[in-house]
Image (cartoon, grey):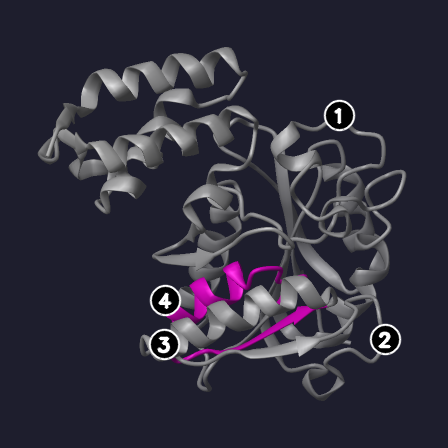
């Protein structure tokens, strides 16, 4: 059986992806090679050759990536924390920036010092990324996730079932609108940590083809100002959190101060803090619930 050297094939793919405008051509080419070879990207050097069949598969995937199909749609997975999630058409692909929101949640669960198992809520869960990553890291937590879109919720259910089968504490997945004044009402005043990655892109924003052509419109856009979901969601957050409970909401990088103002204007929060991402852009706002 004929075999070919991996390195020149990957370099050829890098050049193709670069010319197609892919932002991370070298990384993506290596991830696709690792996917075809069935190894971790870090172990590519240990598998220096491709079979003829693997070469054909790899080049097909590179061609599709050059057409700006998301990398995660081609590999079928996206990472959050220590878990991999199944993703594809119909669900928002989790972004690396949201790892900061996940880390924030874990830090607050670590220092909370509760005498009871912590209750965590993930609003607009999409694929279930934050909820499932938190449940994996904190098996003692009672984690609830809310998603309105049936297609996204199907992906979340698939991921939740797979993580439970692997031994993680099962999460509670709810069909619901995060702006509904009755959503999760049995949890009113009981939630310790709440996270949300809602639709927040202002309508009319220019987006990369991977986003504009493949992520669900419903998961992306938050009205003309990017706040059509976040603004009414503040009431839901206020209602669900216990006194001294904390929340963090991801937002468009143009809206950090406006989201902070929404928390401050609710009159039930203190320690309202704007958090940047690794590039220094505004990424999410966190706040602590005061006692009524």
- Dot 2: element: loop
Q: Residue at x 27, y 38 (%)?
A: 34
Q: Which residue is mark 4?
A: 137
Which one is closest to the eye, mark 1 or mark 4?
A: 1
- Dot 4: element: helix
Q: Which residue is mark 2?
A: 181
Mark 3 and mark 1: Cα distance apart in space: 39 Å
- Residues tagged 3 and 4 counted as in contact (Cβ below 8 A): no
Residue 59 on image: x %, y %: 37, 28
Which one is closest to the eye, mark 2 or mark 3?
A: 3
Q: Look at the image and tell me whether residue 90 can be seen.
A: yes
Range covered by the magenta-colored residues: 122-147
Q: Which residue is mark 1?
A: 206
Indicate yes or no whether the magenta region holds residue 132: yes
Quarter of the image with the C terminus in it: bottom right
Which one is closest to the eye, mark 2 or mark 1?
A: 1
Q: Which residue is mark 3?
A: 168
Mark 2 and mark 1: Cα distance apart in space: 33 Å
Q: Residues within 10 Å of mark 2 (few under 14, many from 20)?
A: few
Q: How many marks?
A: 4
Q: Is residue 229 left or right of residue 207?
A: right
- Dot 1: element: loop
Indicate yes or no whether the magenta region holds residue 179: no
Which one is closest to the eye, mark 3 or mark 4?
A: 3
Mark 3 vs 1, N-terminal side = 3
């Amino acid at each position: 059986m004929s075999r070919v050297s991996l390195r020149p094939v990957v370099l050829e793919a890098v050049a193709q992806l670069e010319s197609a405008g892919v932002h991370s051509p070298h990384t993506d080419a290596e991830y696709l090679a690792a996917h075809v070879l069935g190894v971790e990207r870090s172990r590519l050097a240990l598998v220096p050759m491709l079979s003829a069949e693997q070469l054909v598969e790899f080049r097909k995937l590179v061609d599709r990536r050059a057409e700006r199909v998301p990398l995660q749609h081609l590999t079928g997975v996206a990472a959050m924390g220590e878990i991999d999630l199944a993703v594809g058409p119909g669900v928002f692909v989790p972004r690396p920036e949201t790892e900061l929101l996940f880390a924030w949640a874990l830090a607050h669960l670590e220092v909370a010092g509760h005498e009871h198992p912590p209750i965590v809520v993930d609003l607009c869960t999409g694929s279930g990324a934050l909820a499932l990553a938190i449940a994996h890291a904190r098996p003692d937590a009672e984690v609830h996730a809310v998603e309105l879109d049936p297609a996204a919720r199907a992906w979340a259910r698939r991921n939740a079932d797979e993580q439970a089968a692997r031994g993680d504490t099962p999460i509670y997945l709810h069909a619901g609108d995060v702006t509904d004044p009755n959503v999760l009402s049995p949890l009113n005043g009981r939630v310790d940590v709440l996270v949300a990655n809602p639709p927040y892109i202002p309508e009319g924003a220019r987006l990369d083809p991977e986003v504009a052509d493949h992520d669900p419109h419903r998961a992306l856009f938050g009205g003309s100002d990017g706040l059509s979901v976040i603004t009414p969601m503040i009431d839901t957050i206020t209602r669900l959190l216990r006194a001294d409970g904390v929340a963090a909401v991801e937002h468009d990088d143009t809206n950090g101060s406006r989201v902070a103002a929404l928390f401050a204007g609710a009159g039930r929060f203190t320690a309202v803090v704007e958090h940047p991402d690794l590039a220094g852009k505004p990424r999410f706002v966190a706040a602590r619930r005061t006692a009524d």
